[in-house]
Amino acid sequence: MDPTRVFVKNVRRVVIKVGTNVVMKNDGRLAVGRVGAFLEEIKEMNSEGFEIILVTSGAVGAGRQRLKYRRLINSSFSDLQKPQVELDGKACPAVGQNGVMALYDHLFSQLDVTSSQLLVTDEDLKDPDFRVQLSQTVESLLELRSIPIFNENDAISIGSDPCEDFPGIFCDNDSLAALLAMELKADLLVLLSDVEGLYSCPPGDSQSKLIHTYIKEKHEGVITFGDESRIGRGGMNSKVKAAVKAAYAGTPVIIASGLAVNNIKKVLSGERIGTLFHKDAHSWIAFTEVGAREMAVAARECSKRLQDLPSEDRRKILLDIADALEVNESLIIVENEADVAAAHEHGYETSLISRLLLKPGKISTLAKSIRKLADMEEPIGRVLKRTELADELILEKTSYSLGVLLVVCESRPGAMVQIASLAIRCGNGLLLKGGKEAKRSNTILHKVITEAIPDIVGKNLIGLVTSRDEIPDLLKLDDVIDLVIPRGNNELVSQVRNLTRIPVLGHAVGICHVFVDKSANIQMAKQIILDAKTDYPAACNAMETLLVHQDLSTNGGLQVLVEELQHEGVTLYGGPRASSLLNIAEAHSLHHEYNSRACTIEIVSDVYAAIDHIDKHGSSHTDCIVTEDSEVAEHFLHQVDSAAVFQNASTRFCDGVRFGLGAEAGISTSRIHARGPVGLEGLLTTRWVLRGSGQVVNGDKGVIYTHKNLSLE
């Protein structure tokens, strides 16, 4: 649930205003199908105990359509040649009200719901006695589960357009809905429109963005509204005025699309739908309208301040974070347990829950890895190469911070800590988007980490992205964000790569192989494959395919390995040869990541066939050979084109911490920039620093190049 929408858990009475553009089609006819779907949603809410009060527009538009038709068929040809007089503004709603209410009554009766009509005018609601009687009537209707349907009685109303010229208490159905929400003590007012909510400028503008939370102090006077309603009296301007009035009187308001299916349900479940108006919105600025660009720019500014700190000060930030994690361990575990319980309740896959869980000792391990990272050699400004170009002209190639990183994770709250600590050590700003299943864990970890960052750097160094809606905007910021690291399944990585021009570092899947050669020590092979598969089956470096030399199928070695895996509860699926020989189910694909206690097993003729299989079905992550033949081993290690290749060691060793990198931002299968576990070096770039004594090129006439390599000391 979005943190700004938590209040909806206590909502029971809802006033819903249905705009003309929702009730009517563009051609002026009633939108029967759309209204029918909306009323089905209302019926379900009514059954669930919500008290629903409708305010509907549409009478003016419906009446205008019917009267135009009537005038047309009653006109002679000569009448039609004359200038057409505008239809009477009072006659239209008088005629149209019948049609609108007939539609509601018919559709509600099909759903076995009783509705009731209440036509009111501004003069009516000015009368205190009338308002008391009205409230009593509505209470009675709600007790009987009848849906009250309000409309301004435009046929006799003395209101006029525009509303600014009208001295009354409401002048259209938007302001009527706001008044009723306050008068009837509603918990929420929903104004349904034909757009998703309030935009920063007219929705057709390419620069327009949806405002998720309206903040009066920020947005009042700066929003440019589009056209008024095409076929009604209102428009977004009147909706915003009504919303502000109701919200600051104590009734939260959401402007949302009435054209989208089940939007009311989504609003009441706390989803970030439409634009929220709330009297406390100004205090939610951290959760609301810090836009994608603002967040990225703030992270970049903080990263520059971080880079300017002395090395020891940056080191101290990491040590403070490690201490803070340990001090707040119990609080972090409580939030993580809540995420895990919710994941079980939602029926998430076991592999995802496994990655989500912060196991006992995990916080201590993370703190230890951060301290190790702090004690590593200073990465920023390290001289990698020094060259004398000419006399007193010295060129240095130095390491330098990348700038701003965007990391998109599924589950893995522990990864957030590792990535944040790596970013800080390298002087980078960071934007983090965790999966919704780890929301509480990520929120508390982000709070603990950022509170340890001194004000001289700024808490915005690490931004926590709370909504998936912000990801597409962030991925467009190739002028502010320097590297994207997606950590999740193939679908996530593919989506990120397709949506951005920013360099992407990571891997889509981890289909790791272990090839057991004919010369392998079977006892060693057994230990390696069991560890590679069962130590942490959900990890990307876990074995997913076991390849076995065909000779082991005749000397008993294959049977030993199969029995050991089955004894440990591993479900085996076979390739074409193994499934037939072992009488096991055939794998539906040889390119499959199980992330569980399951794997594919296949029989190959030799090391060449094993390499060919890995080339065709692998993911260039981590692949291992178990063999005592050094010549076969070297051929495998040189020919398998993966980020990590091992001999006689579990694939689970492919890890930033185990490699001594201190931590890892992820494992990359790219061939550019960084490959394998990505630690400090993978989050740095280089730049050239040239120190001279007044030299100029001048067509290279006055420079004698020496290009001499110099010591780094």
Image: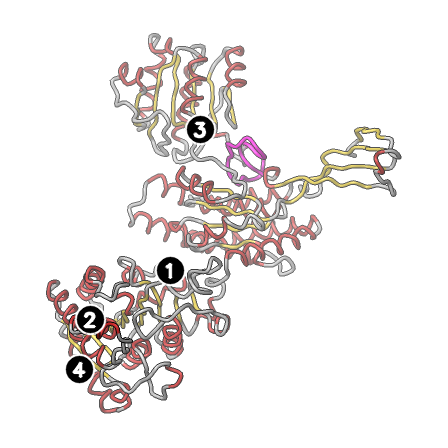
Sequence-wise first label, 3 or 2: 2
User: In the image, is 231 to the left or to the right of 633?
Assistant: left
- Asked if disc 3 and disc 1 are in contact, CB closer than 8 Å, the reply is no
Sequence-wise first label, 1 or 2: 2
Q: Residues within 10 Å of mark 4 (few under 14, many from 20)?
A: some
**The magenta segment:** 659-679
The dot on residue 619 is 3
Q: Is residue 254 magenta?
A: no
Q: Secondary structure at mark 3?
A: loop
Q: Quadrant of residue 73?
A: bottom left
User: In the image, is 158 to the left or to the right of 441?
Assistant: left
Give, as a three-letter code, the residue at label 2: Phe
Which residue is denoted by mark 4 in the rendering? 137
Give, as a three-letter code, the residue at label 3: Ser
Residue 50 seen in this snapshot:
yes
Q: Looking at this view, is 598 or 82 the one in front?
A: 82
Picture residue at 57% right of the left edge, 58% below the top: 459
Picture residue at 40% right of the left edge, 73% below the top: 237
Sequence-wise first label, 4 or 2: 2
Picture residue at 20% right of the left edge, 71% below the top: 77
- Asked if disc 3 and disc 2 are in contact, CB closer than 8 Å, the reply is no
- Asked if disc 1 and disc 2 are in contact, CB closer than 8 Å, the reply is no
Q: Secondary structure at mark 1?
A: loop
| Residue 68 x/y as whole percent | 22, 72
Which residue is denoted by mark 1 in the rendering? 272
Q: Residues within 10 Å of mark 2 (few under 14, many from 20)?
A: few
Sequence-wise first label, 3 or 1: 1
- Asked if disc 3 and disc 4 are in contact, CB closer than 8 Å, the reply is no
